[in-house]
Image: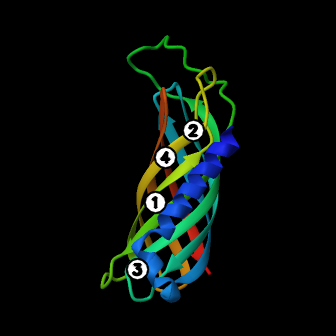
Amino acid sequence: MHLQRILLAWSGAATLASLSPLCAQLTWLHPRVALSAGLSTYAGNFDVAGVGALVRLALRFESPRKPLSVQFESAYHRFTAFAQVCPTCPGCRCSPEAPPSDVWTVRASCQWHFRGVPGGFYATGGLGAYTPVAAPGQPSGAAIGYDLGLGLRRAGRGLFVEARYVRLTNEPTTAWLVPLSLGFLF
């Protein structure tokens, strides 16, 4: 069931991308592969939070004439959970024994590259399907997430750094991911 939701989200993102204004410029789009790794943290309306690492692989289509690019990616986050500090209710059943959490994602996004700004500054936003990020004992299932972020990269190919704010929704759980990654665009 989780795989079906992820595949449905992926196919929906691919369909939206094919209908985008960039589709008319396909002859001008250049595919690039991006590989990145970094740190990630999550929190939400549950009793645990987590810190960990991420690895991301992306396929980006860029136009040298337009500031807009499209990206499809898959990422793996590995979190170690810890109990959140709750100063208002010391006996609130926080669960320090929460196990590490593995989160997989598929995501489609757009990047807006700010022309004329030194250093290759860009904004990113996207939509993705995420495996559960829920505390033990809470209902879990695939979550839909949207994100906004900022990045900085060398012109053309090369190193980039990117930070995002991701909001995941899977009723009744809401979670927030904040990944910071360093990568290379081939």
- Disc 3 vs disc 4: which is toward the camera? 4
N-terminal of the two: label 3 or label 4?
3
Q: Of all residues shown, which one is farthest toward the top?
A: 91
Work out whether mark 2 precedes mark 1 in sequence or the reverse, and give the earlier one: 2
Please state the horizontal and vertical placement of residue 166, each as a whole percent of the image: 46, 49
Q: CA distance from mark 2 to mark 1?
A: 17 Å
How far apart, in angstroms, are the residues tagged by discs 2 and 4? 17 Å
User: For the residue marked with disc 2, what is the amino acid?
Assistant: Gly
Against 113, is 49 above or below?
Answer: above
Q: Which percent across, then down, holds residue 43?
A: 49, 37
- Identify the mark at residue 163; answer none if there is no mark: 1
Mark 2 and mark 3: Cα distance apart in space:
31 Å
Q: Secondary structure at mark 3?
A: loop
Q: Nearer the N terminus, badge 2 or badge 4?
A: 2
- Find the distance from the CA under tag 1 to the CA under tag 4: 15 Å
Say whether residue 101 is visible: no
Colour logic: rainbow
The residue that mark 2 highlights is 50
- Say which quarter of the image contains residue 133: top right
Q: Which residue is under mark 4?
A: 145
